[in-house]
Amino acid sequence: MNNPEIIKASVCGSSVHHESARAQVAGAAPYVDDIPEVRGTLHAAPILSPVAHGRLKGLDSAAALALPGVRAVILASDVPGDPMLAAFAGDEPVFAIDTVQHVGQVIGLVVADNVMLARRAARLVKADIEALPAVLNVQDALAAQSYVLPPVCVRRGDAAAALASAPHRLSGSLEVGGQEHFYLEGQVAYALPQEQNQWLIYSSTQHPGEVQHWVAHALSLDNHAVRVECRRLGGGFGGKETQAGHLAVWAAVAAAKLKRPVKLRLDRDDDFMITGKRHPFSYQYSVGFDDSGRLCGLQLTMAAHCGFSADLSGPVADRAVFHADNAYFLQDVEITSYRCKLNTQSHTAFRGFGGPQGMIVTEAILGDIARHLQQDPLAVRRRNLYSDEICLADPSRPGEPKPAQPTNAASATQPIRRDTTHYGMKVEGNMLPELLSKLELSAQYQQRLGAIFAWNQEHSTVKRGIAITPVKFGISFTATLFNQAGALVHVYLDGSVQVNHGGIEMGQGLNTKVAQIVADELGIPLHRVLATASDTSKIPNASATAASAGTDLNGRAAQFAAAHVRDNLAAFVGGLDGVGAGAVRFAAGKVVTPKSTRTFDEVVSLAYANRIQLWSDGFYRTPKIHYDKTTLTGRPFFYFAYGAACTEVAIDTLTGENKLLRVDILHDVGRSINPGLDIGQIEGAFVQGMGWLTTEQLVWNERGLLSTHAPSTYKIPTAGDVPAHFKVDLWDAPNTEDNVFGSKAVGEPPFMLAISVFEALRDAVAQARGDGQTGELSAPATPESVLRALYKRHALLQTACVASYTARLAPSLALAITTSLVQVIFA
């Protein structure tokens, strides 16, 4: 595999196009809803709760059933197996049973001859619900100790003592909203009964194995009776990791009752109302620091808004705790994580999986420290980076580590190296000091600091801000058991190759990369390798395509499978030529020994004639990782991916509108398998993260109804939000761990680069206010949020804002507008 000729001919490392790109552009790449429907297929639509919390007393479905073509109403009593979903916490029913827990909870289904009829009929079903008190905000949840899982606390050192002895202290709070997945392909499942009580499920899912288990559990079957297939997703982002299972179960239960195929596809509004989002988080913190801005002690409380059931809230909140350090050494730290139960949709996985929620609060804290000390935020961030520096923990002043001095004398102080996380994992391969320096120069950060200051002095309405923020993101499932994968490689008589693995292609290019890896392992052109649909009858018990580990796991398993076939062929050819198998080389479609050169196709034909195995399986499990979930300590990650972004923004101080002006990114993907795909992932992740922090606002009203449940009210970024200068460079260094091709994961880490947008906005707000304060800017930084941050607790500027705005209007409107502004903005 490391032969120079093979490297020269390598498919890996080149920017080949996505394997489905041409088909997708031509409209010839089928998704679940495009699969031709079997004769007799029925369509289902959900019956939704209109109440946030209540006792379900009955259901009137007469009007729905009276419509011609409506076949049935499916309720909890129709579930053949366990009425509770097979989620790990066992706290969520298939359909609402005695109570409803949020507006939009699925009470049942209407099944009809076509989808529009089913949806119309579902709206006619009337639920008799006795309203109960609902918990709709995190403050009430904390006061009532309403949790989906018990709180968790991680400590290192003595944070309280460190705070008490720190030269400087700050306290504050932060509110960060959730995010709708807004995948282009909505949630969909198609359940087809097969012979002898077997089932075929087409599911738009990131986790076919879990869908298989959930459907079998609901139908009271063994797993082997359920086959789940998925060729591709039209986007997932975590929203189809667990919650695609709901639709598959619902469709299967309906199909089991009616003994006919049933398809269930949610329209966009229902998708919003039913499915969970990225977890909103609320934070409270107290931080101590020295004159240079180096952290001495931190007490941090995170409250995750989990919704009505646990779903994946436990591991999401755990990862937020893990990533609260981001790139920084926390010596004396206490992090408390609350997993709050609210009567809203059950929030779930989303790109970053708690990492963004962990990192953003620490970046905000460091930005505030820099402004408090009137220092460059980048300099403060640098002083807090992980490093090989050894400090001494002084029991008398635990928050102030001192540089270690060589000595042979016994001392009351203990040496601490600034390279170990608060959960006990050593940070290795850390190139952030060098990476930040390179980005600082290439982005002209220091020159632009002066230019932005001058701009803000000269302009009274539009103010600018800038920030560089780093990312250190751990790669692996924190649940160690999921870090495994299998693959099959089949070589056919004509020399063409098929690879099947347990991962899911959802636009990120997983199948393209896996095919590149297999092509290189066999030394054949890429067009000779075909990656096929994920199928539980081929690869059992596959983990979700999540945690950015899709290529790491499935690519390595496929590589191992291809290597087994190659070794079989090498031993056979070596026998023919009287040379050792190690002397046989595979490259450019040729099999070369010191005595002969044959085409790969010729060797395959000869091997088959001599009964040599031309297919194999491969299995991979991630090495080195271990994790104690009771203490949240260990080595949960195989390695870290790093990166940094420099972002410049502008805000309008009269309207609160903001605009991205320039983005420079330098990101670590190891030795890239496909630079074109990786850069596309970085760009897309950044823009999605920007949306989370600027425009994508989730609003629940006082009744618990999600008011922003359609594109008309929920705003994702568009092409117009991307600046003309959007530069992405890859850090040129292989992974220091033994990962496939020396690569690193790229799906999630770049998402957190967008925190630089939020920090740049906070910088602009602070400069606009003139008092160095960010006004408790919350995320997303919508115009309303920016205006509140600019003028709240700033009476002079409040008056100036209202006066400037109303002066542009007719006098008859001024009083009404002024009153509205004061009530809405400054409430």
Image (cartoon, helix red, strand yellow):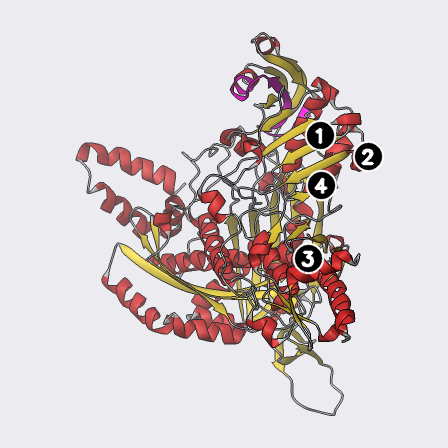
Q: Residue at x 73, y 27 (%)?
A: 194
Marks 2 and 4 sit apart, C-alpha to C-alpha, by: 13 Å
Estimate how packed mark 1 is, as few (under 14), some (14 to 19) or many (20 or more) residues with alpha carbons within 10 Å.
some
Marks 1 and 3 sit apart, C-alpha to C-alpha, by: 37 Å
Report if residue 118 lies within the magenta region. Answer: yes
* Mark seen at residue 222: 2
Marks 4 and 3 sit apart, C-alpha to C-alpha, by: 21 Å
- Give coordinates of residue 611: x percent, y percent: 80, 56
- Identify the residue under disc 4: 210
- Identify the residue under disc 3: 558
Who comes first in sequence, dot 4 or dot 1? Answer: 1
Give the quarter of the image for residue 208: top right
- Give coordinates of residue 360: x percent, y percent: 53, 57
**Would you say the residues marked 4 and 3 are in contact, meaning their CB atoms lie under 8 Å apart?**
no
- Identify the residue under disc 1: 93
- Give coordinates of residue 185: x percent, y percent: 52, 38
Q: Quadrant of the N terminus?
A: bottom right
Who comes first in sequence, dot 2 or dot 3? Answer: 2
Q: Quadrant of the C terminus?
A: top left
One can see residue 27 in this view: yes
Mark 2 against mark 1, which lies toward the viewer? 2
Q: Label 1, secondary structure: give it.
A: loop
**Would you say the residues marked 2 and 3 are in contact, meaning their CB atoms lie under 8 Å apart?**
no
Q: Label 2, secondary structure: give it.
A: loop
Q: Label 4, secondary structure: give it.
A: helix
Whether 262 is drawn above or below 755: the answer is: above
Write down the region rendered in magenta. 98-119
Q: Residue at x 49, y 61 (%)?
A: 15
Left or right position of 568 against 808? right
- Give coordinates of residue 577: x percent, y percent: 75, 73
